[in-house]
Image (cartoon, grey):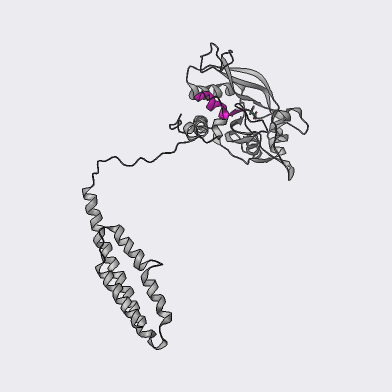
Amino acid sequence: MDDLLVKINNFKTEIKDFVAQNSDDAEAFRIKYLGTKGLVKDVMGEMKNVAVDKKREFGQVMNEFKLFAEARYEELKAATSTATSAAIDEADLSLPADTLPLGSRHPISLVRNRIVAIFQRLGFAVAEGPEIEDDWHNFTALNLPANHPARDMQDTFYINQNPDWLLRTHTSSVQVREMQKGKLPIRIICPGRVYRNETISARAHCFFHQVEGLYIAENVSFADLKQTLYFFVQEMFGKEVKVRFRPSYFPFTEPSAEMDISCLICGGTGCNVCKHTGWVEILGCGMAHPNLLENCGIDSNKYTGFAFGMGVERITMLKYQIKDLRLFSENDVRFLKQFTSAV
Ligand code: PHE
């Protein structure tokens, strides 16, 4: 037992004489004596070897030893913290700080936010829906009954467990969900990720992002559609950009159109990007088909509406002249860090 007393006394001298120049030294003291594997714990562990009749006496000695170490630590800490503030006083505060790398928004998010902001200014609200859809919301309600040939236009991923479920091929399914709510008029845009079973290349991927829009009220006309989209294009690409509409086909709109803008690269004179036509296609649109309205419980004699849908990747590629779609999903920072500001 005497050995233990000698050991404790030696430690006490050591503790008393411990010198700490700065807060790191004080921390080293704490770890050495008071840490979970520290010497104080060690000494306390010896208690099990102390004879029963001496336990009380030794308990007090050890406790006192622990308090002694703790008090010394508080002392060292207090002394060195003023040393640290003295060091700060001497530091050159005009030195530049270490640079912190700043992240940036993904170009797809930047452009999507911009598209959303433009339509919000026209009074469109954002609506969202599930990425795993059922056949009815993605196809049937949109005037594409089973076996309709136009289903082939959208190579679909089906879900094995339930043939009625699929990954939505467009966000038109969100529009259906909004129409079913029965609150009119409707003026929404539906941004979101969509999936198509396409071979990955510079121009196609198995998923992409869309913003679709829908406006349903009384007396909505094709003129409203044209003017809305023209406003969007001018805000997005600049006042000098021209638009044209070409007749097209979508089962859920009648009439349907595809909208082109004058080529941003050559201004319409013809180049590689526009394949020497002077025009590039940016979106599909049309007047909501009466069958679509009726499928969703809306009186097609009273209400009319227009819809449109665009690919965010496509708009981004045109805006920034990006030639390969795969760049968006490869996570190469050299590519991503070029898009630090809002568009
Ligand atoms: N849903 C169509 C697509 O994904 C786009 C579209 C939406 C076309 C609305 C016309 C009207 O291809």
Query: Quick check: is 311 in the magenta stretch?
Result: yes
Q: Is residue 11 left or right of residue 320?
A: left
Q: Quadrant of residue 191?
A: top right
* Coordinates of residue 120 in the picture (x, y in percent): 51, 32
Ligand 1, what quadrant? top right
Foreground: 178 or 77? 77
* Coordinates of residue 257 in the picture (x, y in percent): 64, 21
Give the residue drawn at x 34%, y 80%. 3
Q: Is residue 57 above or below residue 43?
A: below
Q: Is residue 88 above or below residue 293?
A: below
* Coordinates of residue 197 in the picture (x, y in percent): 68, 33
Give the residue drawn at x 33%, y 61%. 28
Q: Is residue 328 left or right of residue 61?
A: right
Foreground: 256 or 88? 88
Give the residue drawn at x 63%, y 30%. 200
Give the residue drawn at x 43%, y 80%. 48
Magenta segment: 309-325
* Coordinates of residue 137 in the picture (x, y in percent): 69, 38
Instruction: List the single residue furthest toward the bottom.
Output: 53
Instruction: List the single residue furthest toward the front.
Output: 3
Q: Is residue 85 left or right of residue 98?
A: left
Q: Is residue 12 above or below residue 167?
A: below
Q: Quadrant of the N terminus?
A: bottom left
